[in-house]
Amino acid sequence: MILPSLSLLALGSVLLLFSGCIWHGKKQSYFVHPLASLTTGDGVSGYHELNGVLLTLEGGRQFGLTLGCTSILTVAPKEWSDQGTCDSLPTTRCLDSIDVASHQTTKRKFPFFTVGTMDSEPVFFYRKSIGVSMLLGFEVTGIFVGWMQRLSFLPKDDTVYILHFNAANRSQTILLRKEVTQ
Amino acid sequence: MRVPMMITMLGLGVLLSTGCQNYLGFGTGTVTGFEISPRPDNSLNLTLGYNRYELAVIPVPEFQDAGDTLDAYSVLATINVESPGLNSYDPEDSLRITQLFATGMAARRMSNQPGMRKHFAEYMEDITKSRRGDDEQ
């Protein structure tokens, strides 16, 4: 009787180690991720990416429960003026002049708890999962079973955004913004 | 039997009520499996199988006219979405999005800038040439 209970306890502990919890704040997010991978980036965009296995719980701006493998990317824009490209006119053609590799720093973290801070509110969200997801919130709402990939871009008023995103190379995401006053 | 039914009805009610959100946004989605989610028009979306969509939502404030300092959700945008095919196994063939997105007063003011007008004209010319090339093939 004791051995099966201990086995279940050990299995449950291993499963929890590879799970993750996120609390989505306005500009700060709180991650509990024992061994789940958390990657942060700063430069041509500010982003957090949590890759969870088995169980992922979310709260705050977005509530969610995902059983299975999931990847959750949250991106906040950087100011266009900080990049010094294409004078003052933000267009997608200027993306070619941005050297992402030299501007973007990426850090991978494996501690149990991380507080991720962004310069501004995130407006770009990308997630994919294999399994069962129940989601409710600002970004996405629904019940998904199987393979799911969702992308949402929710811009603020009176602002210009330039976005370049590649799902195969998410650390190279560019998201810049500029307020146009004249 | 009553409790699961009540939970199901409550869940559907929550899903339908969350469709009443008034914000501007762009999104894409791909599902292989089962999906139940609310649409922007407060209806319910049910998918069983494969579904892919791109969606832009631009709400208009009720009983409110645009003026010199207030805008009714003007949008100026170029959106380029490259999505892998259903049978694509190439790891380089992934979802790519490149877009310029201006909202509200920023969209109105940028549309008056000569440089931005030139950019859009060149962008449309590129699309036209690309489509002509596809037609000739």
Image (cartoon, grey):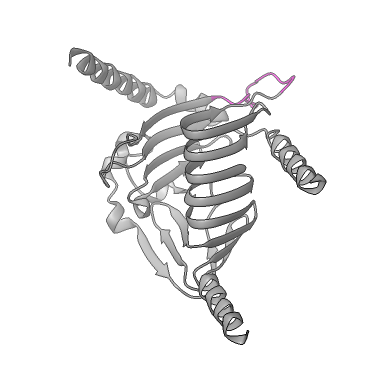
Q: Quadrant of residue A171?
A: bottom left
Residue A112 falls within the magenta-colored stretch: no
- Give the residue at x 62% y 54%: A26
Q: Please state if A182 lies on the left or on the right of A105 as rendered.
A: right
Check the image and report above or below for A66 versus A144. Answer: below
Check the image and report above or below for A89 versus B62. Answer: below
Q: Is residue B19 visible?
A: yes
Residue A91: give x, y in percent of width and height: 36, 34
**Stretch in magenta:** B62-74
In which quadrant is the C terminus of chain B drawn?
top left
- Give the residue at x 31% y 41%: A95
* Majority SS type along the magenta span: loop
Q: Residue furthest right?
A: B2
Residue B94: give x, y in percent of width and height: 32, 42
- Give the residue at x 55% y 62%: A55
Q: How many marks?
A: 0
Q: Quadrant of residue B69?
A: top right
Q: Residue furthest front?
A: A1
Check the image and report above or below for A2 versus A12. Answer: below
Residue B81: give x, y in percent of width and height: 37, 33
Check the image and report above or below for B24 versus A105. Answer: above
Q: Quadrant of residue B112?
A: top left
Residue A67: give x, y in percent of width and height: 55, 57
